[in-house]
Amino acid sequence: MDRILIIDDDVEMCTMLKEYLESEGLETEVVHEGTEGLNRALSGQHDLIVLDVMLPGISGLDLLRQLRSESAARVVLLTARGEEVDRIVGLEVGADDYVSKPFSPRELLARIRAILRRPVTDLPGKRTVPRTAPILLNDIEMDFGTRMVRRNGKPIILTAVEFNLLELLLRSAGRVVTREQVAELVLGRNLNSFDRSIDVHVSKLRRKLGNLPSGEERIRSIRSAGYMYLYTSRSRTD
């Protein structure tokens, strides 16, 4: 049974949400304060964390920053409707997805299940089950045995979303990947025309990877189409 940690100070909402998620087969723990929530999030006992941005003791965004320094745990942010800055900053800090309040429990459940279907990216030194041969492209290597990415042999720490996004781009190198494909295959949901989360994830990935050895940008935006990963003909993917 998948284990969910909810960190939110709205007691009534959490009680309702816990009952709903447990009726859908998810073991659910609730914490109403940020410092305790961070301690529970770092315990490694949960498959996914639902985190409110507005918390007493420590803000949700500060909690997420501290969590990301030690853990690649999957996180869904709860943000106030209309607070686009919180959503963008949350994705920048390392959230996997977000849901705006007020929301239906069914919508949150759909986001949770979509994220749980994605493999989690481990931190260096942690083991995971190998899936396939590495991808080698220019100076980038993706190792699925450790879910690590290296550039010129040096590790680059990616979130689960960033890792899966890079895999999609590398396997399609030289071809356009549409925003709809990214939404479906990486985020696990349909594309919303007002959703900027894809742009944020791509921007973060660009910064972490840097430019190609030639100085060109690795991930090119194709207007009204999507994205393309550039490569030289001397490289290959497996």
Image (tube, grey):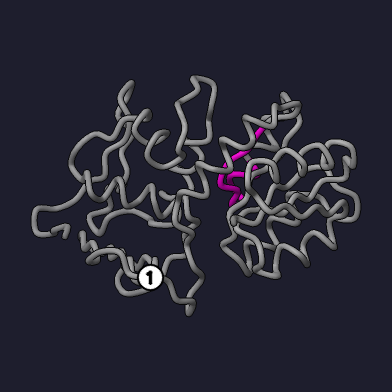
35 left or right of 49 in image: right
Query: Which residue was labeled with disc 1?
Result: 129
Q: Is residue 30 above or below residue 114?
A: below
- Res. 20 image quadrant: top right
Query: What residue do we see at 59% from left, 55% from top?
Result: 2
Q: Residues within 10 Å of mark 1 (few under 14, many from 20)?
A: few
Q: Is residue 138 above or below residue 104?
A: below
Residue with the most extreme left position: 233
Q: Amino acid at mark 1?
A: Val
Towards the viewer: 33 or 170 = 33
Q: Position of residue 102 (x, y in %)?
A: 75, 26
Image quarter (top left, top right, bottom left or bottom right) of the C terminus: bottom left
Q: Which residues are magenta?
A: 89-99
198 left or right of 221 in image: right
Q: Position of residue 106 (x, y in %)?
A: 64, 30
Q: Position of residue 127 (x, y in %)?
A: 45, 76
